[in-house]
Amino acid sequence: KSHAAADSAVGSTAEPAASLSGQQQRPVLRIAPKLVAPAELAWLASAPLRLLAGARPSVQLQQLMGWSEPQLLRPSVAIAQLMELGKMYPAGQVHDPVLQADLCKAAGTLYSSLASCLSDPEQHQLLDMTLSVSPCVWVGSGFVFPAVTALQPVHTTAGTAVAAAAAGLITDTSVQEEDVAGSQETDGRSLLQQQEQQQEQQQQ
């Protein structure tokens, strides 16, 4: 019995050792740095990129690996993230104030990162081909399709310009045109009134 107990004890310790050695022999997953993002940037890059595990890397390491926010938010990354957020959070589905704030901040950052695409014809075309057919415009309770969106920002910024470009219109221009047309109409009416007054004075 004592020999059997000893054998069973040896066997019980050998099994975890064998299991541990098997785990150690598993191949390590190696990924190019440009396909990875720090975990704190999950709202901005978790859809197209893998997230780093463990402690936050130093600023120097982030710069070296290209993991800083400006380096990571390439047009392809920002577009993919916006499209995924739009699928996950459709309009009318987000009611938690904390989640709304996180999504609002993320959307604004992603819009701003795409501002450079507006001056590049090829990248602008990429925006039209992707975001114009995706629910990518944040409206406070989720994302909607650009086709049902009309934006009229008080102050045009890079972020609102991208959102407006995705929606296919920038209403600031139309507002300015309406103001010009209104001023022209006012000038025309005042000129007509002056002519009428002159005619009345001549008749008198």
Image (cartoon, rainbow, N blue to C red):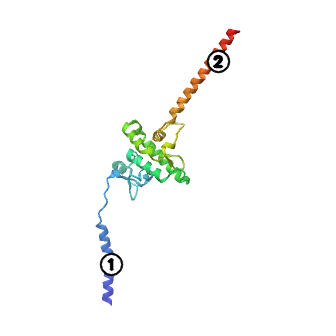
| Residue that numbered label 1 is attached to | 13
Where is residue 71 shown, x and y percent of the image? Answer: 37, 46
Element under disc 2: helix
Residue shown at 31% from the left, 85% from the top = 6
Where is residue 105 shown, x and y percent of the image? Answer: 49, 47
The disc at residue 112 is none
Name the kind of residue labelled 1 in the image: Thr
| Number of other residues with Cα within 10 Å of mark 2, as a class: few under 14, some 14 to 19, many 20 or more | few
Seen from this angle, which residue lies furthest right?
Answer: 204
Front-most of 77 and 178? 178
Where is the N terminus found, in terms of image quarters? bottom left
Q: Dividing the picture into quarters, in which one does residue 181 lie?
A: top right
Name the kind of residue labelled 2 in the image: Gln
Where is residue 38 shown, x and y percent of the image? Answer: 40, 53
Q: Dividing the picture into quarters, in which one does residue 10 lie?
A: bottom left
Where is residue 122 shown, x and y percent of the image? Answer: 36, 38
Residue shown at 53% from the left, 29% from the top = 177
Distance of label 2 from label 1 (alpha carbons): 105 Å
- Residue 190, visible in the rendered structure: yes
| Residue that numbered label 2 is attached to | 193
Front-most of 171 and 77? 171
Figure disc tally: 2
Q: Is residue 168 above or below residue 55?
A: above
Q: Earlier in the sequence, mark 2 or mark 1?
A: 1
Could you tell me if the residues under marks 2 and 1 are in contact, i.e. CB atoms within 8 Å? no
- Looking at the image, residue 153 sits to the left or right of residue 60; the answer is right
